[in-house]
Image (spheres, coloured by chain):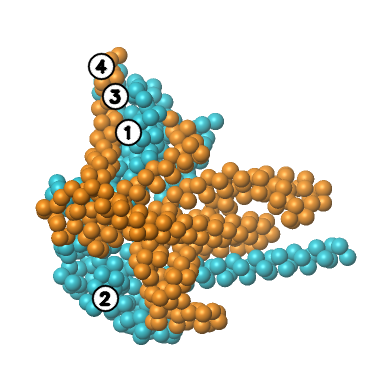
Chain colours: A orange, B cyan
Amino acid sequence: MNKQKLYSFFYIIPIVSITLFLFIFPLVYSLYISFTNLSELHFIHYNYVGLVNYIIIFKYGYFLELLKNTLIWTVGSLVTMMSLGFGLALLLNQSDLKGKSVFYAILILPWAFPGFISLLIWQGLWVDPYGMMNRLILPTLHLPKVNSLTSTTDAWIELIVTNDWLSFPYFMTVFYSALQSIPKELYDIADLDGAGILTKFVKITLPSLKRTIAFVFITSFVFTWNNFYPIYILTGGGPGISTETFIVYAYQEAFSYSNFALGAAWSMISTIFVIVLAIIVIKYTHILDSFT
Amino acid sequence: MAIRRYKILKILRLLFSYIILIIMSFFAIFPLYYVFMTSFSNAPNLISLSISDLIPKHIYFTAYKYLISTNLYGGSFPLWVRNSLILASSTAIISVLLALITGYALSRLDIPAKKTLATFIYIVTFFPYTATAVPLYLLFAKFHLLNYIGLILAYTPGTSIFAAFIAKLSIDAIPSSYEEIAMIDGLSRFGAFLRIVMRLALPVVALTAILGFTGAYLDFALAYSFLLPNVKEWTATIGLYYMAGLLNPASAPQYNIFAAGAVLMGIPLMALFIVSQRMMTKAYSNLAGVKQ
């Protein structure tokens, strides 16, 4: 029996060692780096500098600014994406609507096309003043132009609209399939009782979707919090640092400004957030229960 | 009277639905249509890209010809795609092996502290490549792993852990008597694993391969930080980032060349996405059936 147990370990060694080597080890190492002054100037001969990097982060208000930005980014994206997806799912779920599959096939495209490439395309669309957005689309719709280089509000509009485009099909799909799993009989009974559309929505639809909405909200919250590419590609965190989030700023400090030690310190802070969020997801959604 | 009012309301409701769905369809399709048309135009940059290019009279293949045959920035698009293919296929193969070995262990073997172990490795999946980019870079720089081997190592865990959990569930569904019979017939446990489990869990193998492949193929953050100095080793995503004019605007090629690259890279990946989506839904519905 003991030999059997030892044998089982062989199967688990690869994943455990790869997790230790690629996850725990780098984190410990960059925790160490975050207490040094490793940067382009001090690449080989760097010294222990204590808490200096963390003092910079907390003392000069960067932390609060980035926390605020990350919250605007996450909540702003989530609220708009989820409402858009939910609304479209409701529209598609009408039994007397024709051409559903055609609409669905078109609306799913932004999700199917690789996100990184879409973002590069959107970046070209938003460029002021040459991009199609400011030259064609916004003037046609009689909307004001968007300039993300100078206005923080414009930068957020650009980021959130683009993120909505990338993500609404996912929410639409999830909500659509959840809507279809509600038994039709419930609505038939409500019809007999003479319930209106609004009553049916509040009394049947919303309660049936409560669990789906909660699950989607929590998992997408973590995803959006960690979403790196939209901000990195579209605004680069600008103007100034007014659209920087934790994850983007950590990357830029290290790879755009070569402040590796400061980047490591930001990574530590960002990691703590991710772990806390992950534990909340695991606890709340019981996602692992079905797996173990 | 009431019936007539009901009918008018119904028409209004459907009209409203169609209008919203049509507007959203335009929104969904526009950026993709725009880049598709740009790739067949001969507009050299964003300024010269006119509204008439969106409804073209002539189709030019110059951008595609240029993209395939010309050297860019010391590398070339086919070379970068080849690099990406090497990276992505290696990641896919290693992910499959790792995911199935782990899934098998979680499903069949008696491992102490299984739940803790599962929770621990599951947390890793919450970390996108971008969150661990700085720590991995710092550590890999020390071990001289800022190359393809390092990248493949870094790409593997995320996909394989997620896939290991799906693999675990589908291996649960394979009766263990199959392997026992095979082992009585003289196969070793590992032989039974390769010949019986791998074959029966083929859908999971395929799904893992696709997820690993697209994950690695579309990564930009890690590849950029690891490979930037050496143009010949660039991946297709770095190449596209450069062609979009974000790396070095002065030396970027014409905009229609970028568009051609985006189309050539995006379409196959979009097809893969649709396939993997179908398989994912199928895997989940099979699993739901197993649980009952």
Badge 3 marks a residue whose secondary structure is helix
Callout 3 amino acid: Ser
In front of the other: A200 or A69: A69
Q: Quadrant of the N terminus of chain A?
A: top left
Callout 2 amino acid: Pro
Instruction: Check if mark 2's residue and mark 4's residue have beta carbons within 8 Å.
Output: no
The numbered mark at residue B249 is: 2
From the image, tell me which residue sits under label 1.
B102
Q: CA distance from mark 4 to mark 1?
A: 19 Å
Q: Is residue B227 left or right of residue A235?
A: left
Q: Residue at x 51, y 39 (%)?
A: A284
Q: Residue at x 29, y 24 (%)?
A: A8
In the rendering, at what x and y percent does residue A149 appear?
Answer: 39, 75
Q: CA distance from mark 3 to mark 2?
A: 55 Å
Instruction: Check if mark 2's residue and mark 1's residue have beta carbons within 8 Å.
Output: no
In front of the other: A46 or A75: A46
Q: Is residue A109 left or right of residue B23?
A: left
Callout 4 amino acid: Lys
Instruction: Check if mark 4's residue and mark 1's residue have beta carbons within 8 Å.
Output: no
Classify residue A124 by image quadrant.
bottom left
From the image, tell me which residue sits under label 3.
A8
Residue A268, relative to residue A143: is it above or below?
above
Please identify the residue farthest to the top as the structure is shown: A1
From the image, tell me which residue sits under label 4.
A3
